[in-house]
């Protein structure tokens, strides 16, 4: 663990992830990056990017997977459950209350417009986080041009061609893993 600081207890981990969950309407990942890396110093940018990468290929929501990984990293299974509880408890209650209220107003144009507006904000938050994490690619052992090409291919496949994300992760992601292993093996045998 190369981060300068660490949570003092599983309880602190629970409250930190509860705070993330309550701040992250429309997208918790940008808030998590700011909170865990910049404010608390529990992870470096590189560690955050690596944890996010692992969380994205596992089934389930990225932030839930990250909470489990980070919690386990510091306090084992107790930390994993504390972080998981923190990221899920408050949103569960809020979503149940909002779902009940939304069911009563769903057909109104105002509700439909609000949902579209929230989608735009969520997309902007994810784009901003991508820009913040882009400098971590400098330490990536693969060529920057290849990383950029894989990023553009992912955007094109998922966003443009509407290929299901699971197929892109398995196909393009799997290809990149195989290429990275070959590339790293090649670099170690050359030097």
Image: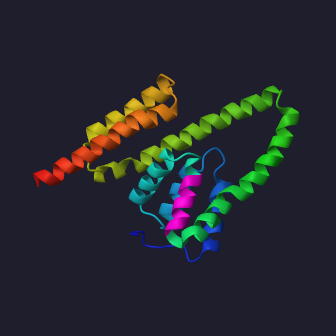
- Asked which colour scheme the image uses, the reply is rainbow
Q: Position of residue 37 (x, y in %)?
A: 48, 62
Residue 171: image quadrant is top left
Question: What residue is drawn where x is 17% and y is 54%?
Answer: 188
Residue 144: image quadrant is top left
Q: Is residue 131 above or below residue 51?
A: above
On screen, residue 38 versus residue 111, left or right, reads left
Residue furthest left as drawn? 190
Q: Position of residue 176 (x, y in %)?
A: 33, 40
**Magenta: predominant secondary structure element?**
helix
Q: Quadrant of the C terminus?
A: bottom left
Residue furthest bottom as drawn? 8
Q: Position of residue 61 (x, y in %)?
A: 59, 47
On screen, residue 143 versus residue 114, left or right, reads left
Q: Position of residue 145 (x, y in %)?
A: 27, 37
Question: What residue is drawn where x is 58% and y is 68%?
Answer: 77
Give the number of marks: 0
Residue furthest top as drawn? 161
On screen, residue 159 versus residue 174, left or right, reads right
Provide the residue span drawn in magenta. Answer: 64-73
Camera sees residue 73: yes
Q: Quadrant of the N terminus?
A: bottom left
Question: What residue is drawn where x is 63% and y is 51%?
Answer: 24
- Please tell me whether residue 71 belongs to the stretch shown in magenta: yes
- Please tell me whether residue 39 belongs to the stretch shown in magenta: no
Camera sees residue 142: no
Q: Is residue 155 above or below residue 51?
A: above
């Amino acid at each position: 663990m190369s981060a300068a600081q660490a949570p003092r207890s599983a309880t602190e981990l629970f409250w930190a992830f509860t705070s993330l969950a309550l701040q992250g309407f429309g997208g918790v990942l940008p808030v998590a990056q700011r909170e865990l890396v910049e404010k608390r110093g529990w992870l470096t940018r590189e560690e955050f990017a690596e944890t996010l990468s692992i969380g994205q290929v596992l089934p389930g929501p990225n932030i839930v997977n990250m909470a489990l990984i980070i919690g386990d990293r510091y306090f084992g299974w107790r930390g994993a459950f504390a972080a998981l509880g923190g990221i899920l408890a408050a949103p569960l209650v809020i979503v149940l209350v909002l779902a009940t209220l939304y069911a009563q107003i769903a057909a109104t144009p105002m509700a439909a417009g609000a949902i579209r507006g929230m989608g735009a904000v969520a997309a902007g938050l994810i784009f901003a986080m991508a820009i913040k994490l882009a400098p971590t690619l400098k330490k990536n052992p693969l060529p920057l041009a290849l990383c950029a090409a894989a990023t553009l291919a992912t955007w094109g496949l998922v966003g443009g061609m509407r290929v299901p994300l699971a197929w892109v992760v398995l196909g393009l992601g799997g290809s990149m893993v195989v290429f990275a292993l070959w590339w790293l093996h090649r670099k170690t045998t050359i030097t």
